[in-house]
Amino acid sequence: MNEDKKEDKNEEKKEEKSPAPEPSEEKISPLEECQKQRDEYLAGWQRARADLLNYKKEEMERFEQVLRYAGEEFVLKILPLLDNFNLIESKLPEDLKKDDNVKGIIRLKNQIEDFLRAQGVEEMETAGKKFDPNFHEATEMVEAQGAESGTVLEEIQKGYMINNGVLRPAKVKVVK
Amino acid sequence: MPKILGIDLGTTLSEVAAIINGEPKVLENREGNKLTPSVVSITKTGERLVGVLAKRQQITNPQNTIYSVKRLIGRRYSDAEVQRDKKLLPYEIREKSDGGVEVKMGDKWYSPPEISAMILQKLKQDAEEKLGEKITEAIITCPAYFDDSQRKATKVAGEIAGFVVKRVINEPTAAALAYGLTKKQDQKIVVYDFGGGTFDISVLDISHDTVEVKATGGDTHLGGDDFDQRIMDWLVSEFRKDQGIDLSKDPLALQRIKEAGEKAKIELSTAQETEINLPFVTSDSAGPKHLYYKLSRSKLEELVRDYIDKSIDLVEKTLKETKISPKEINEVILVGGQTRMPAMQEAVKKLFGREPNKSINPDEVVAIGAAVEAGILQGEVKDVLLLDVTPLSLGIETLGQVSTVLITKNTTVPTSKTQIFSTAADSQTSVEIHILQGERPMASDNKTLGRFILDGIPPAPRGLPQVEVTFDIDANGILNVTAKDKATSKTQTIRIEGSTGLSKEEVERMKKEAEIHAAEDKKKQEAIEAKNLADNLIYTTEKTIKETGDKISPDAKKDIEEKVEALKKIKDTDNIEDIKAKTSELSSAIQKVGAELYKQAGGQKAPEGSEGQKPEEGQKPEEGEYKEKK
């Protein structure tokens, strides 16, 4: 970047501040000038009042949006817990999987999943599907014998839908 | 009137803002995000993707995914920057016949403006959808160090996207506009822009009608991403020390560590300590391994101290070229998400000896500034309509030397607020209005703006008179306080100038003091509320006893009188818990009496002085309580 500064000292180092649009130049009496201003201010005042009233009307809509958004944000924050649970479950050695104590702990995962389902969250199915950036985020391209190019080979992190929209895309390995 | 869009066309991320209801606001894209990745791609099936969708498939399609095209726009192929980036970027770059640059996407070659135009087109469509109207004009920002050719290319990109580009303005100028600093004259401003991948310094000179860039500096390869890398390196090294395993060889683990590190960095801007918890980060023959470390803010600062110091050195170097000293700078503006870091803010503050402007979201300030410029051009944001806020709360002193707020801080002016107060003692015929400014709950800790007395109030039991107090601030920050006795309509008023004209330093100081003393102030407030409650209860109880005479049984009367004495004895002590307890006891006792009387009367009006008049617990004494008469 330092090289650029030495180039071309003539370029735009000064910008003019934008003036507001100029009013027209006709000659008018002080009274007319005053009346013009009065009309302008009254109109401005009415507009501001109307803006406020419209804003209030739109506020209920906004509340609903915010609540929905807050709900989604909250769910997004819970997902990493579920991610870790899924990871733990996948890494458990077989003998531990059969242990009743461990089974009990893994039940917690089901509880979290139930909670999420109640919020309208659905797990995304990715196995064997064609890679689609609307739903998937590619983390790696891998060679895979016998698998169709451009399909999802492995899921690194689950993706979720909420209210028919994508809550979080699935992180996947894609076949080269 | 059709809107003009303000567009921050960034190297990695872009943002759009417009004036909505008189205020600049950042618009979300179709995906619901405020930030749009500056990435364009053509898939194998010939589909064009822009933004987050293009980013998601980047790894599967690196040669046809164009990103960071801002590094190439308006440059000649022979430029050193182009040659350097050619080695780093995975897509093909070649020289155009006129010496310019071309990039390959799919089977076609495109000029950088054409690629930027695709990004701008998406931003345009999403904004039109969001606003429900067609947009034809835009203001696009660019770095202050862009030369004529780069600015022209940026303008062309806008035109290809279907915009009439009203202006291409400098990013630091946009930041200054967002803070309203261009309204002033003879201002020397430094913009400290620490983003994800680049660090830019600009020194601006604002005169009556121009904004001049006196100097620029920085480092095009220093940013928040480097901070994330340091955290990553630290985690990998700690893990290697503790577990003997090198996680840098494991791409999956590294990805998790990178994300966790960035999350921790962000949390440490508000918390003093955070945890990095990655179960099953790897495994060896002994079994699974988990990563768990606590990272403190001070440790993070230690890890990145040299980067922060480097940035300050670069600022000093840039300033030297202008021969302006840091102390001569009037305003400093922080731009870029990384500037949220307290240590960075402190370093900047220390260098310039003043608080930097950081109240506007540093990720949004450039887009907002572009929208402000759009507003000015349209005449939508008239100078006279650029409104101030009152920086500190305004109120009056009430019973117990408490400060009762009428207008809270950051309220837009002009505005007016009215509240009804009353007298504190029987037959009080005058009230003193003591006007206060500040955030502390105790009147003596706030600033006195003025005082006056309203007298001629007809004698009445305490709490009965209605004194209407109105605070009115006009657009120039002039405060008029009026007190009116509703019975007599007698009015007294005072006019105070400059209530919004505090220096930024003073405002910050008062706010900080309020924060520091918050805990002890809260205790004091509780004590006063308890005492006020006790006082009020004693008054109303004694009144009730007097009025109802022998309708109460002598036993009940004695019990109440004893409780009143007990409360009287301790109400002026510091023992809040005891006061609360005795108040509660007396309250139950008098309530029982009230219930009894009600039963006797069989439907007559309940005696005055029952629960209704007591101010709610936790609330400041507002209705019905007032300062003692003079």
Image: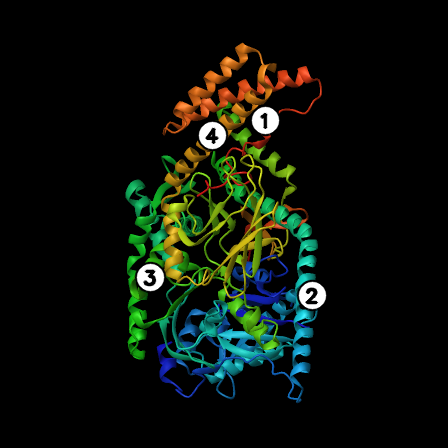
Distance, label 4 to label 1, CA atoms, is 14 Å
Distance, label 2 to label 3, CA atoms, is 44 Å
Give the residue pinned by disc 2. Answer: A46
Label 4's element?
helix
Residue located at (57% from left, 56% from top):
B416
In which quadrant of the rendered image does the C terminus of chain B lie? top left
Residue B132, image x, y percentages: 70, 65
Q: Is residue B413 above or below residue A25?
A: above
Q: Is residue A166 above or below residue B585?
A: below
Distance, label 1 to label 2, CA atoms, is 47 Å
Label 3's element?
helix
Residue A114 in sight from this viewpoint = yes
Q: Is residue A25 left or right of residue A80?
A: right
- The residue closer to the viewer here, B530 or B302, is B530
Q: Is residue B372 left or right of residue B261?
A: right
Q: Amino acid at mark 4?
A: Asp
Q: Is residue B310 left or right of residue B558?
A: left
Q: Which mark, residue B610?
A: 1
Give the residue pinned by disc 4. Answer: B535
Q: Amino acid at mark 2?
A: Gln
> Answer yes or no: do the residues labelled 1 and 2 have beta carbons within 8 Å?
no
Q: Amino acid at mark 1?
A: Ser
Distance, label 1 to label 3, CA atoms, is 56 Å
Nearer to us: label 1 or label 2: 1
Q: Earlier in the sequence, mark 1 or mark 3?
A: 3
Nearer to us: label 2 or label 3: 2
Neighbor class of circle 1 (other Cα within 10 Å; few <14, some 14-19, many 20+) is: some
Q: Amino acid at mark 3?
A: Lys
> Answer yes or no: do the residues labelled 4 and 1 have beta carbons within 8 Å?
no
Residue B406, image x, y percentages: 52, 49
